[in-house]
Structures are given as C-alpha cells and as structure tokens.
Image (tube, grey):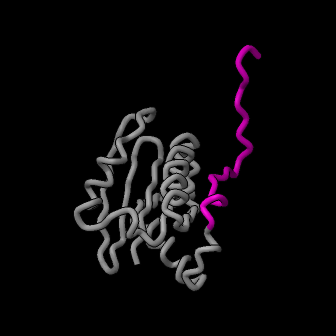
Amino acid sequence: MKVLAMKSSGDRTSVSVILNDEINSFSMMHERKERPNWEMFLDNVGLNKTFTLKEINVFAFANNQNSYTATRTIASYMKGLAVALNKPLISIEDEPTDNLEADSIALKAKEMFEKKGNDRTEFDPRNANPSYKEDVKFKKLNE
C-alpha cells in the first residue's frame, strides 16, 4: 500500500509517503505566512523517482487546529490530487498537544483505510474537509 500525507502547522510543514514497508519523510520550518513549495517537498520524498502520484492508494492530511489557513491550504491541495486521481482522502485529527508529523498522519490513515477493508467509498474526497473545534469568527472589513 502507498500513502501520501501532508501536515502544516503554519510555520512547519511535513510530507511523508509510505511505499509498502518503507516510509520517506521531509519537513521544513518556514515563515508563518509563506506557503511552501509542495513540488519541492514531494521531490524530497521521491516523487517521480520511487513513486508517481497515480500509484498512491490513499491521500491524507492533518486537520491541524494550530493554523486554520495552513490546514485549509493543505486540505485543498490534497483534495485536488485525490479527486483528479479518483483516490480516497482521509482527514486525520491532530490536536495541538499531539505534535504529529506527516509520517504519523500517513500511518494513521493507512490503519483507518485497512480497518475499513480498503473501502474507497468510506473516504470520499468531497467529504474530507477541515473542521474546527472552536467557532471561528472573522471580523468583517469596515465593522
């Protein structure tokens, strides 16, 4: 089984790929408002050298409560990949105290997928959305 997972907490982003029994990961610190170059992250875990996106069985992202913007951005990117490739997408809850990296997200996603008997319909990308425990209230301009 091949799983690709991403996580961003706003100032740290990680990506991990499980290739059968091997896990390759890459993480990097960056400015909070800087969106990392995901192509560079994927290159660093072996994209197009040891695997292709078409070979991925499951995509996953961390539903991180530390950065709403980073989580929405990662979720949108992963959803685009999963929908385009007709693959399942799993959102993994990541509490601020968990301090998980993408490798843990990938392992949890693999476990969830296998527990459901590899049933892709259980993990429709259209249903994998970020959720927030707190009611996020944004101030409107000119209020």
Q: Is residue 139 magenta?
A: yes
Q: How many marks?
A: 0
Instruction: Give me the residue at 53% from left, 82% from top.
Output: 114
Tell me the quadrant of the picture where the N terminus can be found: bottom left
Is residue 43 at all visible to an observer of this figure?
Answer: yes
Q: Position of residue 2 (x, y in %)?
A: 39, 73
Q: Position of residue 100 (x, y in %)?
A: 45, 61
Q: Is residue 12 magenta?
A: no
Left or right of 58, for residue 30: left
Residues 75 and 97: in front is: 75
Is residue 96 at all visible to an observer of this figure?
Answer: no
Left or right of 102, for residue 62: right
Residue 67, placed above or below residue 115: above
Tell me the quadrant of the picture where the C terminus can be found: top right
Q: Position of residue 82 (x, y in %)?
A: 51, 60
Furthest-left residue in this view? 49
Residue 64, placed above or below residue 115: above
Instruction: Give me the residue at 38% from left, 62% from top.
Output: 53
Left or right of 142, for residue 101: left
Instruction: Give me the residue at 35% from left, 42% from top.
Output: 37
Magenta stretch: helix, strand or loop mostly: loop
Residues 143 and 124: in front is: 124
Residues in magenta?
A: 124-143
Instruction: Give me the residue at 32% from left, 51% from top.
Output: 41
Furthest-right residue in this view? 143
Q: Position of residue 103 (x, y in %)?
A: 39, 66
